[in-house]
Amino acid sequence: MDNLQKFIHQVRSRLFLVLFVNNALIFADWWVMEKVIGTDPMRLVISMVVVTALSLTLLPWLSATYLAQPTKLIWQAILHIAPDTANVPAPNLKKRTIGHDLVMNLVSHVYQLASVVDSIEKTEASKPRDLTADFVGNSLPLPLFVLDKSENILFANRAASEYVKRANSDLTGQNVYSVLDMSFGTDETFDKWLAKAKANAAVENKTWERVRLKVPIDGSQRQFDLAAYFNAENPEGFETMLVLFDHTQKYNQDDQGLSFIALAVHELRTPVTLLRGYIDAFEEDLEGRLNPELTDYLHKMNVAAEGLTAFINNMLQVSRVENDQLTLSLHEDQWPEIVKTAVADFSLRAKVQGITIEAMIAKDLPTVGVDRVSIYEVICNLLDNAIKYSGGSKKIIIKSALNSEGLVETTVQDFGAGIPEGIIGNLFDKYYRSHRSRSQVGGTGLGLYLCKAIVDAHGGHIWVRSKEGEGSTFGFTISPYAKLADEKKNGDNNDITRGAHGWIKNHSLYSR
Ligand code: ADP
């Protein structure tokens, strides 16, 4: 208040001075004109009017600028700290002005206030937002988990807490792995994906299908698809988001359907094996004694029985894949032997259709680490398709060689109708069959799906190249045994744990 009083006093004295100067000027003018010059009354009046007008214009103008100086400095200080006028310089407070002490005092208050506001804003910004209050994710009808940098749950929406049957307050702060069973096997498990995303420090997202989760509270088994989003830069620390799409009912129905088919198919296995045995016996015993027509019938019976066996094997394998029960035991094996056996087993079937299978196997291939029965099925499925879709062409070429990555690559090439480019991406999907195949050739749409599952489980890669009208080449890679053995040595247990599709439970490696 002292400063204000001092300022009022200064203003008062300045105003007094201005008024005094004004009156003094008018008086001096009168005195000079009347007493010194002795002018006539008319001139005297004119001179006094002019002097009065001049002093009334100049003096308020000069004094207003002077008296407004403190306001100007305070105004400049406010503009200097205001957020959207950052280029206004700070006022020079050393300059002597009227109300100097008051200005110093007020400006220092303004600066103090600004620093308090700034620190409050900073504290607010660093505080994690309370998501539970009004976050839109609460209305999402799908379970949603938001994780922080340490993979602890920052927020679980209502659907999430109902899903895992735990109160929301109980979930917050828990590590996600203690709430959700994320140990599902897959090409890339959730934790591996997250570690990679963190290493890249980028924005990433990924989805998983058919993830199984045991709800710890009641032990029930759920099946869902999972979508995850990662953003290291999230300013509020919401680094990872997980959304669960529950398909338990649908997936369980699929599983039950397949279990039933698997059961029925399993029952077919014994009679078909018996039939094949009898056909083989007939072929051996009657060789040379049947006329060409009957020999041809016998061949066709044999081919049909082989086809049926392949179908049964496929169905059983698919049901194992679906039930998480496909077990691979990788053994050291000679790849040319396996390829040659498959080619020999298919030569009759090919011959019946007038097709020859040409095998080109590179010499000195290293031994491979494979599950013989399963990988043999891959070759059989590819050869079977090449025959089925050969469309009247007469040759199939199967080649095996080491590729540039040191993997054993095997290709099966046909010169049939080929595959339209638009559907190539779907071929390895379960039950996928092209429209044309559906109407012209029998099949289940499971062969390539199974091939991919088996090749993936071996840690290999399966691909297709095709041109309509020119034919198709299907290829896959498998690892030399030495490479797998290295992997095993570096692993922390005896099994090769590299996942394939989430369904390979047991993946062990044996040397010969
Ligand atoms: P299926 O042969 O029982 O239909 P697959 O999974 O083996 O099932 O094959 C899926 C689809 O891929 C087939 O229906 C066919 O349309 C296409 N396909 C597979 N192999 C070939 C091939 N060699 N040439 C042309 N089309 C093929």
Image (spheres, rainbow, N blue to C red):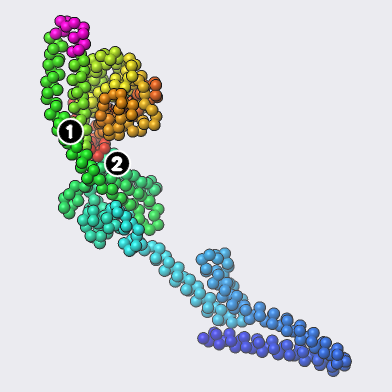
Decide: few, some or many residues near mark 1? Use Cα within 10 Å; few <14, some 14-19, many ≥20. Answer: some
For badge 1, the amino acid type reads Ile
Q: Is-magenta flag for residue 420?
A: no
For badge 2, the amino acid type reads Glu
Q: Position of residue 223 (x, y in %)?
A: 23, 45
**Observer-nearest residue: 302 or 211?**
302
| In the image, the residue with mark 1 has its CB under 8 Å from the nearest atom of ligand 1 | no
For residue 188, the mark is 2
Tell me if I can see residue 426 in this picture: yes
Decide: few, some or many residues near mark 2? Use Cα within 10 Å; few <14, some 14-19, many ≥20. Answer: some
If the picture is divided into quarters, which one holds ligand 1?
A: top left
For residue 196, the mark is none
Q: Are marks 1 and 2 in contact (CB under 8 Å)?
A: no
**Residue beneath disc 1:** 261
- Compare marks 1 and 2 and give the one earlier in the sequence: 2
Q: Is residue 1 above or below residue 397?
A: below
| Most distant residue in the front direction | 439
Q: Which residues are magenta?
A: 286-298
**Observer-nearest residue: 162 or 25?**
162
Q: Is residue 507 above or below residue 69?
A: above
Q: Is residue 173 left or right of residue 15?
A: left
Q: Main secondary structure of the magenta part?
A: helix
Residue drawn at the location 26% of the way across and 48% of the way down = 246
Spatial CA distance of label 1 from label 2 is: 30 Å
Q: Quadrant of residue 285?
A: top left
Residue drawn at the location 77% of the way across and 92% of the way down = 27
Q: Is residue 13 left or right of residue 222?
A: right
Q: Is-magenta flag for residue 293?
A: yes
